[in-house]
Image: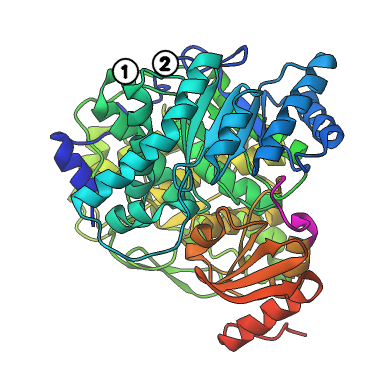
Amino acid sequence: MSSAGDAAAKSGKPLSYAADLFSYARRPSREVTVGGLGFGGIHPIRVQSMITSDTMDTVACVRETLRLVEVGCEMVRITAPTIKDAANLKHIRAELNALGCTVPLVADIHFKPEAAMEAAQWVEKVRINPGNFADAKKFNIRDYTDAEYAAELERIRERFTPLVQLCQERGVALRIGTNHGSLSDRIMNRFGDSPLGMVESALEFARIARELDFHQMIFSMKASNPKVMIAAYRLLVARLNAEGADWNYPIHLGVTEAGDGEDGRIKSAIGIGSLLSDGIGDTIRVSLTEDSEYEIPVARALVAPFEVRTAVISPVSDIKPNWPLFEYQRRSSERIALEGITRPIPLGGSETVAVAVLRRVDEAVAHKRDALGDYQPELILEDLPLVEVDPLSSEEIAAVNAVTEPRLITVRDGVALEPIAAFRLLAAQIDARHPILLKDTFASASSGDFLDHLLNSATVFGSLLCDGIGDAILLRSEEVPGQSLRLAYNILQAAGVRIFKTDYVACPSCGRTLFNLQETTARIKASTSHLKGVRIAVMGCIVNGPGEMADADFGYVGGAPGKVNLYVGKQPVKFNIPEVDAVDRLVDLIKEHNKWVELPI
């Protein structure tokens, strides 16, 4: 099965997604116009969302679109699961125009090329998913010969070409939007359920479009697992770079099925924020299991730092990253033992990432330690045998590397670098035996509100942890002790490096959804949130369900109106359960697989 390394070998040169990982520069891309709105090029990073109303309900769709535009949404996506739904986009567009609203509309297409053809007559952009465009996913396991694979591509070409030609004629843009949860059997069997498979799936369609001299394309690589999502986008950009300078298409960023509340915002920041920090991304959508207008302030806050950030000249020229760029591998430090607040804390090696706090934080929560549950402070910063280093100082780096015993290392406050660049530069130079303490900020206090602190901390820690860097974290952007502790642990959980509570993969609602996602997710959480280390997926329909549940233990998926199918991993095991009984049946399924514990009294 092919890997990212194989892709690099075939290209004849190392793959790279950024010119320099130790400084910021936005990735150059060509301009793509959607309606009257420019993407990529010199344009700002655009913010978009998707409505949840039934596409056949014109009044509801118009009302929800107007609400989104009011709060700053620049492009609105609407599902078109059937030709009938696609045809109603004509009326939605006309009603919006009559009200003076010219926001570009995007038709979201799965499975039906005929619906895409209809939708392209009425909207400014069509999103197709190459994993299920003219493909019915059957999870078949087979080996394709080269001839069989070529025949499949020719079949796709025949189905896709008319849409490309219609978009050319009408000036409609295309998003080639791969989802980790819905790769075709053809791709799965040759490249696996992998970032490389996601990228290859998109490139197959892009090559067809380019042969027709069509270039009004935007790419996306969405996944519910931030590590997978980050790796896929990095590999996509690297492959586009390797294909040639004129493959510089804009990139749409999103973590799909991020969930709700703090967890959904944290997961989105880890995926989207880390890529924006690398200069990748021309438009974003934050996918929350909440009313769609609540996505926009989060997206705006994520984009805001990059609206004022300018390209930085790298302070180094001969230092290269020493970690894998397109797959997760934790940096291999040696294990050390530290005196913790209530117990000894092993750090480094394969030990779990620990949480350090300032002494004042521990003192503030000491009286209610039992009530904190799993959100316990573990190490006090002022008591740590910590070595602080300026990663720009070759003398300080040499002094650390001269020490034979492993030491806990961090970046000194006040260095002239952003935290992500500073810790990458540190990790690239110090010997691997030394564990690293990450900081989210190099200032003692941060301005902004809690959302700003959440997004900043999740972006910094998430990016570095998904690089495999970090053995302990110190969160300082949020000064409220209880909130800072909760935030630190939730970031570790969302980054997949410390699983201590139930993890939920919950898709945002849309017109395809077969039940009320917000209410259902709340009921499932009420019954299962005490389970530690269990991952539950809540999916409104089957478009991405089975694939995005690859990392989940159990899945709750809309199968038909009022009916739910239950999954174990990707495998459906119970069908057409009345929605009123489905949460109880989910609990029974968890018990059957010995993952259930009773709620503590």
At x 46%, y 25%, the residue is: 164
Residue holding disc 2: 30
| Residue 26 falls left or right of residue 241 | right
Residue 22: x, y in percent?
34, 31
| Residue 206 falls left or right of residue 378 | left
Residue 357: x, y in percent?
57, 55
Residue 53: x, y in percent?
78, 42
Task: Report the disc number at residue 407.
Answer: none
The answer to whether the residue labelled 1 contacts the one labelled 2, judged by CB atoms less than 8 Å apart, is yes
Q: CA distance from mark 1 to mark 2?
A: 8 Å
Q: How many marks?
A: 2
At x 42%, y 16%, the residue is: 30
At x 58%, y 82%, the residue is: 595
Residue 298: x, y in percent?
67, 36
Residue holding disc 1: 246
Front position in the image: 52 or 139: 139
